[in-house]
Image: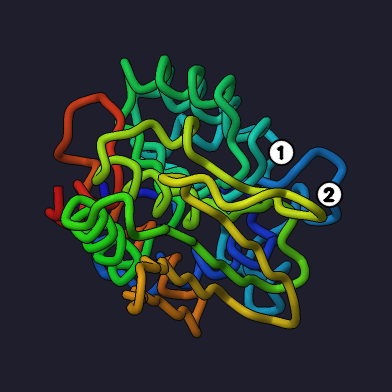
Amino acid sequence: MSKTTGIAVMGASGRMGRMLIQAIEENENAHLAGVTERAGHDWIDRDLGECLGGAANGITVSDDPLEVLAHSQAVVDFTSPKATVLHSELAAQARITHVIGTTGLEDSHLAKIAAAARHAIVVRAGNMSLGVNLLTVLTRKVAAALDMDFDIEIVEMHHHHKVDAPSGTALMLGEAAAEGRGVDLADVSDRGRDGETGARKRGDIGFVSLRGGDVVGEHDVIFAGEGERIILRHIASDRMLFARGAIKAAIWGQSQKPGEYTMLDVLGLN
């Protein structure tokens, strides 16, 4: 039996799915335990290596996540909210680590994931990179240090294929800023300005989403005061950094108790 962590990848054919597979192959502490794709996909029941344009590797692409998770110690999931909720239930049944990078999750999805975390280790983050998680810590500290005379705006830009806005990372940064100020983000979030909106409300945290080209991810947290601005910025130029972070989280989860965790926990920043 292998001493490395067996990790399953959901949505193997997607851009992130392919990168996750590569990241697992590059990690000496992990091995690929299985992969899935949606029912009816061209890859179903075919060898993964051949689907990826290489030699056969003995891993068959499945449309049955339960079967795949039964032979895994962790699962990495960058799919869709509906699929992720299903995977969380199955991961809880299998008592394995579930790493979630899916964005666009709503309160109803999060409630079901929280229920699954009573039986499984769930690591969920809007962004898996070290740099962004450091930015989150800094955002919380700066927000706590400054008063309401500093307006907070979060600007994010991603490629034109991204379907949700604001990005999961932007919302994560917004939560950090709100936590630093001791407020609930839902009460101060300002996500839409168009036409005669009136003056900016004191204490609001604003979000602006830009989409275009092949931008991997750029995030600015702007603290704008009278006569000065403080800008915290992170620019991602390689999507593989997210994949490597997710694999790190999957391995880290093997020594944890059931519950919900973030990348701050994985990186020892909490």
Residue at 25 percent of width and 24 percent of height: 258
Amino acid on which disc 1 is placed: Asp
Asked if 1 appears above or below 257 in the picture, the reply is: below
Other residues around mark 2 within 10 Å, as few (<14) / some (14–19) / many (≥20): few
Relative horizontal placement of residue 57, taking residue 223 as reference (left or right):
right
Residue 18 percent across, percent down from the top left: 60, 67
x, y percent for residue 63 = 71, 38
For disc 1, the marked residue is: 63
State the residue at coordinates (27%, 26%): 259
Residue 224 is tagged as none
What residue lies at 46% left-to-right and 30% top-to-bottom?
70
Q: Quadrant of residue 207?
A: bottom right
Q: Dot 1, how many residues are within 10 Å of its Cα: few (below 14), some (14-19), or many (20+)?
A: many
Residue at left offset 72%, top offset 71%: 211
Residue assigned mark 2:
41
Up the image or down, 121 lies above or below 16; here it is above
